[in-house]
Image (tube, rainbow, N blue to C red):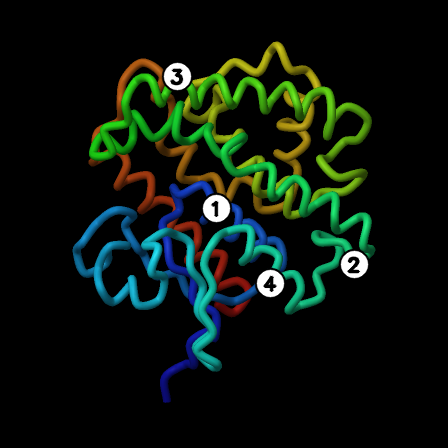
Amino acid sequence: MSEAKPSLVLYGVPFSQPVRAVLWLLFLKRMPFEMQLINPGSKGETGSRHPSYLEKNPAGTIPTIEDRETGFLLAESHAILAYLCNRHGWTDLYPAGAEERARVDWYLHYHHRNVRDASLGLVAPKIRKDLEIPEAMQSAARATVTRALGALETGWLSDSPYLCGDACTIADLSCYSELGQLQSEYTNVYDFTPFPSVSAWLERMHNVPAHDDVHTVLAELGDISQEAPSMERIVGANKSALSVLKQRLAEFGG
């Protein structure tokens, strides 16, 4: 008899910033799941624009999760993070108290069109040439990220080690998935020196369990500041990340 597959399926690729946030949560909680690769923007059989995937998520974005047992489908990284915490009672990462949870929600709502623009303005132009992002849009996104970093520096991180207090939450996982990729040890496309509190937080996040595993794809990809990576390099980075993913899943029954 074949071994039963995990009930939870995660659709996406390790390089995706929103996917990495979900991966980190699942790794932290040693939650068994199966990852099915979905290439963003592709109309191929494993693409996010293929009809079979669009039936699951009409927006054609990643990540999406599916519960094999119930058929439940859910897209959008922040919705997934909150749902998983609610479903499994992970109140250490998504507090139960109304005010504490509201602070996490506050950041998660702020993230879009603010911190999230790190990918649009600094990473996607080199990785996703097919998007043909206009320079004016890239420039505006970079300016938005700098303003967002100022808000983190003087607000969320001005008097606490993490975004919402003394402990890491899903707000930190989401934020780091965007900003962490920009660091010198990864893509090396942004200098955080003007933001000491943010810089200290980035270092602090390195010590959150599963950090290195989740960010294998970035460590493998390396510096893209001077030259856009080849498709072979991108594919190789994703393969390395998937290898680590399989090892970890085997350790906790996935």
In this rendering, the answer to whether 161 lies above or below 172 is: above
What residue does disc 1 label?
20
Q: Distance between the residues labelled 2 and 3?
A: 39 Å
- Residue 4, labelled with which disc? none
Q: Distance between the residues labelled 4 and 2?
A: 13 Å
Under tag 2, what secondary structure?
A: loop
Q: Specify which label sits upstream in the sequence, 2 or 3.
A: 2
Quadrant of residue 94 in the image?
bottom right
- Residue 96, labelled with which disc? 2
Of residues 39 and 203, the one nearer the viewer is 39
Around disc 2, counting alpha carbons within 10 Å, would you say few (fewer than 14), some (14 to 19), or many (20 or more)? Answer: some
In this rendering, the answer to whether 174 lies above or below 66 is: above
| Residue at figure coordinates x 32%, y 54% from the top left | 60
Looking at numbered disc 3 in the image, what kind of residue is underneath it?
Ser
State the image coordinates of residue 176 (x, y, percent, origin top left): 57, 35
Instruction: Give left or right: position of 53 versus 63.
Output: left
What residue does disc 3 label?
139
Q: Nearer the viewer, mark 1 or mark 3?
A: 3
